[in-house]
Amino acid sequence: MVSFALTDADRAILNEAKAQADLASRHAREFEHDEDRMLPHAFPEAEGRPDTRAMLAALESETSGAKIVTALLYLEDWRGGVPLREARYSLGNTALRIAGTPEQYERWRDRTIAIGLTESIGGSDPASTRTTATWDAASGEWVIEGEKIFITYAESCDAVLVLARLVHPERRGLSAFMVEKGTPGLSVGRQFRKMGIRFEDTAPLAFSACRVPAFNHIEGDLKSMLRSFSESRPVVAAYALGVTRAALDFTWERLSQIGITPDYEKGPTETTAAADRLMSLEAEWEATWVVVLQAKWIEQNEGPGKIESSMAKAMGGGLARRVTQTCIDVLGVCGLSDVYPVEKAFRDARIFDIYEGTGEVQRLIIARENLGYSPKELN
């Protein structure tokens, strides 16, 4: 039987995460005008506080499961605007675990691995990849040439898992390669100047005669590797829930100062228009929270669910835009002022409907799966 009731251990971990998010929130504005500054591994306030991921590892048997609680921890991280401790784990780590050999995973498992998919010409379409990996039989190495853009952890990662088109006498198609930082021919560009999430390390990568040994070729099935998105998309939705929760909480707090509080037993004709709009969004927030947990429960028990993952991502991205826009509408000048957190939440929220597959892409995935169409038949 599926149950989304949290255990006592879940609540203990998440309450600590919530307290840490409150501490981290005082640093949220520090990166707004200094995007070249990297997040520290931990802010000073983390000293003496337990690592919530370590708490989860110690109490896992008493929780709802590591995948579910980890998603909820990311929700709390983003409630504070920045994480108190940086999570040294990226989408590339998940892709390596899925597609790499045991020897490859053992070698790089403790590294922070960025994933290099997006190119300026292709956006969300891997089939348009132009980066190449040419086999050099004389040296037994692959030579990578090309560029990737909008790479999260580009500067702070230890290695990048890069998607490239094979140039080989006997092989064709796309494959992945692990390129470690410091490899000659790999260079990191300047940090992108972004509308939101300005604290997040996002930069382009360039590969010029970048040589990697044969061992670095991740030869696992590409479709399996891309399945990592089915694991990460509900987490992106959890990020969105964290940002929207912070915006909703602040807006309710401001409204309470003039006597407007939520009353879920009253109909729309018995409450203010502002409260009614926010209560409708609270219901959407709860629905998205349940879909995130459902996606992670399925992943935990049966493996990643493609439709459920895309549903969570599409719902989270759309919700983040609607909630933060409505909070600004309700708060007026207070919503636009950089003295308060809502305008930052509004800017941060826009990314959740874009990265790791846009909302449009998620709806296409859901439609194809439900209708039985291939990508060529429905695109």
Image (cartoon, helix red, strand yellow):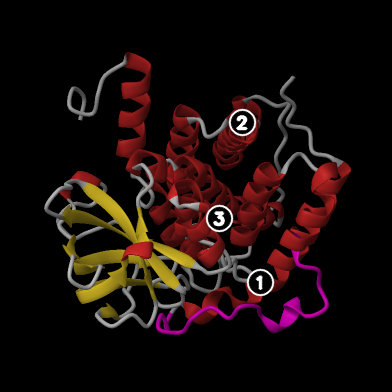
Residue placed under numbered mark 2 in the picture: 294
Residue name at image x 37 percent, y 17 percent: 370
x, y (%) of residue 333?
A: 47, 63
In terms of secondary structure, where does tag 1 sit?
loop
Would residue 330 be visible to someone looking at this image?
A: no
Q: Which mark is residue 84?
A: 1
Q: Nearer the viewer, residue 169 or 375?
A: 169
Pointer 3 or 1: first along the chain: 1
Q: What residue span does the magenta drawing correspond to?
A: 33-52
Q: Residue furthest right?
A: 8
Q: Are marks 2 and 3 in contact (CB under 8 Å)?
A: no
Q: Amino acid at mark 1?
A: Leu
x, y (%) of residue 159?
A: 42, 71
Q: Are marks 1 and 2 in contact (CB under 8 Å)?
A: no
In terms of secondary structure, where does tag 3 sit?
helix
Which quarter of the image is occupied by the C terminus?
A: top left
Q: Are marks 3 and 1 in contact (CB under 8 Å)?
A: no
Q: Residue furthest front?
A: 138
Residue placed under numbered mark 3 in the picture: 243
Q: Is residue 29 left or right of residue 124?
A: right
